[in-house]
Image: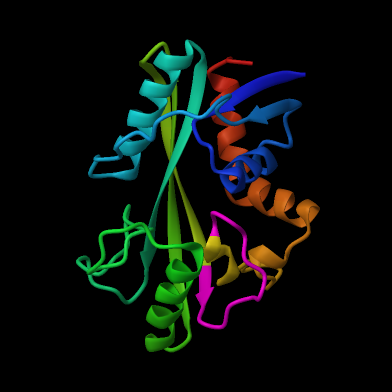
Amino acid sequence: MKEIIIGTQNSAKIKQISGALSGLNIEVKGLPYKMDDIEENGSTAQENARLKAKEYSQKLEEIVLSMDNALYLEGLSDNEQPGINVRRIPGTTNRPSDIEALNYYVNIIEKMGGEVNGKWEFAICLAKDGEIIDEITIISPRLFVSKPSPKIVEGYPLESIQVDMESKIYISDMTQKEQNEFWQRTIGEEICKFIERNEIL
């Protein structure tokens, strides 16, 4: 089976991309060993995806695919949008825990009526030996609710307040098969095409 390296040590992200790519006969692997965090100082999700893809591919001397996210919620002003700072809580300097991040967004959505439409921006970048091969951005709509599922996905806590618009199921409550189908439908088709057009497998 062919392999692709994802520039992350977040097991939830690896499972997400693995599910999205389950239509291809490939094994999705995270970084092969503990590496220093890369300073994500870009002003957009795409810039941060580039930073990670370039540095990890250079260090590993392998082709690496990196993904960075930005979040936008309807009803918030430009200044209030999480954007690329999804895991930052205003007024704090430390990275919040999963519970702290979840509670922060529950409070925001509760103040907005308990249910908000939003969208994720998935920035995908592919690099080899520190040089960019290709990149895309995928926009994926989502419904956010203030009543969380009791099930929390480590590393991806906001899946406890995201509901699939088609099945009306919390993402965190889905079986692995349901999650794979969800990620294939929402981002997988475009990522698969992206990989195939670059003929990296």
Residue at the image point whose x is 50% and y is 22% from the top: 64
Secondary structure that dominates the magenta span:
loop
Q: Is residue 46 above or below residue 26?
A: below
Residue at the image point whose x is 41% and y is 82% from the top: 107
Q: What's drawn in magenta, residue-wise?
A: 143-156
Q: Quadrant of residue 82?
A: bottom left
Q: Is residue 21 left or right of residue 39?
A: right
Q: Is residue 198 left or right of residue 131?
A: right
In the image shown, does 95 or 102 lie closer to the viewer? Answer: 95
Q: Is residue 166 left or right of residue 81?
A: right
- Residue 161 drawn at (x, y percent): 55, 72
- Residue 29 drawn at (x, y percent): 64, 29
- Residue 145 drawn at (x, y percent): 53, 78
In the image shown, does 104 or 185 lie closer to the viewer? Answer: 104
Residue at the image point whose x is 54% and y is 54% from the top: 155
Q: Is residue 68 above or below residue 115?
A: above
- Residue 163 drawn at (x, y percent): 61, 70
